[in-house]
Amino acid sequence: APTLPALLLLPAGRAGAQTPARAGAFELRPYVGAYLPTGDQRDVLEDAVLVGAQASYRITQRFAITGTFGWAPSEDRLTTGGETLDLYQYDIGAEARAASWYSRDSWSFTPFLGLGVGGRSYSYRDLDDVDSKSNVAGYGALGGEFGFGRVGLRLEARDYVSRFEPLVGDDDAETRNDVTVAAGLTVNF
């Protein structure tokens, strides 16, 4: 059975199918989703809504560079009173986009894989005596986009691995994991 990366390299499945017309190579995308801590990170932070924006530049039809900024208002599980913790993530990555798996005159479906690196900052909203912490993070992404000409609906899941310094205290930094899932509205320029 073919693997997912091999399937991404297959050409479009329907002879004579045309990809709906798109504008230029630049894409803007507001998104909304969920931040889901896993493993040890789940002991520290609550699940949270995630909102943000992406900008992509398609270098070729099958390769794009994507920059992402997101914000999640999580809650610290370790402090008394469940303090709100603003989590900011910012990264840049490369995407391998397949030829459309399904394509008609009015719409298409195109899967993608991505890898990237960036950072993450944690900032208590109401604790002025605690400094913000920023750490490096990397991700792997998997998703697809339903394209309708100049607009699209993008579904994406990301698995983040990050360095995590304790928010309060002097404990050593550790490697942590979390996941984000999101849906975004793509506008092509």
Image (cartoon, grey):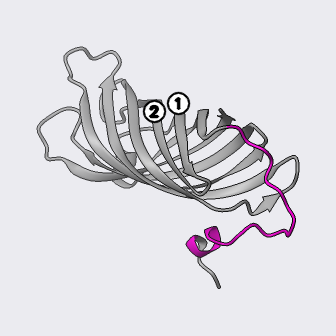
Could you tell me if residue 49 is visible in this image? no
Residue furthest left in the image? 170
Outermost bottom residue = 1
Residue 167 at x, y = what percent? 24, 34
Residue type at mark 2 is Phe
Q: Which mark is residue 69?
A: 2
Q: Determine whether, in the image, residue 134 is placed left or right of residue 55.
A: left
The amino acid beneath tag 1 is: Gly
Report the Cα–Cα distance between label 2 and label 1: 5 Å
Q: Is residue 43 rendered to the left or right of residue 150?
A: left
Is 13 colored magenta in this rendering? yes
Q: Residue at x 80, y 48 (%)?
A: 20
The percent coordinates of residue 150 (x first, y second) are 74, 37
| Quadrant in which the N terminus appears | bottom right
Graded by Cα atoms within 10 Å as few (under 14), some (14 to 19) or many (20 or more), the crowding at tag 1 reads some
Q: Which mark is residue 52?
A: 1
In screen coordinates, is 88 left or right of 157? left
Residue 117 falls inside the magenta stretch: no
Q: Which residues are magenta?
A: 5-23
Marks 2,1: beta carbons within 8 A: yes
**Residue 107 higher or lower than 89, as above or below:** below
Question: Quick one: label 2 or label 1, which is nearer the N terminus?
Answer: 1
Q: As rendered, which of 44 and 114 lies closer to the eye?
A: 114
State the image quarter where residue 86 is shown: top left
Q: Helix, strand, or loop for circle 2?
A: strand
